[in-house]
Amino acid sequence: MIALWLALALQASAQTDGATWEAKPGMLRLGGMVLFFGGEGPLSYQLPAAGSAPAGAKPVGEVFGSSCQYGLSVPLALAPRATRLAAGRGLGGYEKAIADIHSKHPGLKGVYDVKVDTRHLSVLGIYRKQCVEVTARGFQ
Amino acid sequence: METMRSIFLCLLAASSLGGCLYANVRAPRAYRSATPADVKSDPSDPLVAGESCSRVVLYLVAWGDAGYAAATKAALASAPEGVLYDVRVDQKVNSYVLGLYAKTCTIVSARVAKR
């Protein structure tokens, strides 16, 4: 049931009720007793639209960048509501994702037509990874 | 009977570990699509559509890519260098037998401008 909730909640949470520059936190959710958390997640980003590339800009095609937060959530017993010990870290925000794009494409001046997705990976509910994935078109 | 009991206990154990055996899904987060004023639009620009889906089975395993990137890529399959504008994005959910199998799709409908 939680997996179904996860799939639907992820979709629902992605509904941009407000503008993209409005704050919409995307921190990794661990649950249980969080012993340590040192992570960074996306909050807001004024996404450049397709027509925002300056005149004379040279398009370089599709570019992709990502940044991730990682977490561990270990149950203390094999019971439905067992206490969990959790920890998390990682730079998973927009800044790191855009920096990842620039590191892969030196000389890139900017991006436009930006699509942002969130990738959730969970293995047995113990290891969790949440990534912000930015797909865009670049220009020089 | 013993086999069924073992399977039930395994599922119960799995559900105690966060209720999800394995999940690897992409979900849409943000997309600032272009309007007709942002691109060189033309009334003859073709109308295209694309979708991307994720699935969950038995409440335990979730997989798929229902993100914006995959949906827009599917919409641009016939014109990879084009730019989508006047974009409408919908979400479709198909759930069967109390959600034992569910599919969630992001559907993108738009026009394609050359640039």
Image (cartoon, helix red, strand yellow):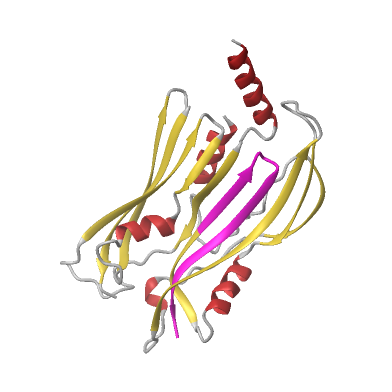
Q: Describe residue B68's horizontal placement relative to residue A37 as left or right.
A: left
Is A60 drawn above or below residue B54 in the view shown? below
Seen at 50% across and 51% down, the residue is: B26
Question: At 60% across and 59% down in the image, what residue appears?
Answer: A23
Quarter that holds the C terminus of chain A: bottom left
Q: Is residue A109 left or right of residue B37?
A: right
Count of numbered circles in the view: 0
Q: Is residue B22 above or below residue A63?
A: above
Is residue A6 toward the left or the right of residue B12 in the image? left
In this view, the residue farthest toward the top is: B1
State the image coordinates of residue B8 (x, y, percent, origin top left). 62, 19
The single residue placed furthest to the bottom in the displayed view is: A56
Residue A2, image x, y percentages: 59, 33
Q: Is residue A124 magenta?
A: yes
Q: Which residue is rendered at x = 49% and y = 58% of the image?
A: B30
The residue drawn where x is 25% and y is 57% is B48
In what quadrant of the picture does the N terminus of chain A appear? Answer: top right
Q: Quadrant of residue B45?
A: bottom left
Residue B72 spot, x, y in % from top left: 36, 59
Q: Is residue A52 above or below residue A115?
A: below
- Measuring from the top left, give residue B68's x and y in whole percent: 43, 56
Q: Main secondary structure of the magenta part?
A: strand
Q: Along the line of sight, which residue is nearer the eye, A15 or B105? A: B105
Residue placed farthest to the left in the image? Answer: B44
- Residue B37 is covered by the magenta coloring: no
Quadrant for residue A98, please give it: bottom right
Looking at the rendering, the stretch of residues picked out in magenta corresponds to A117-140
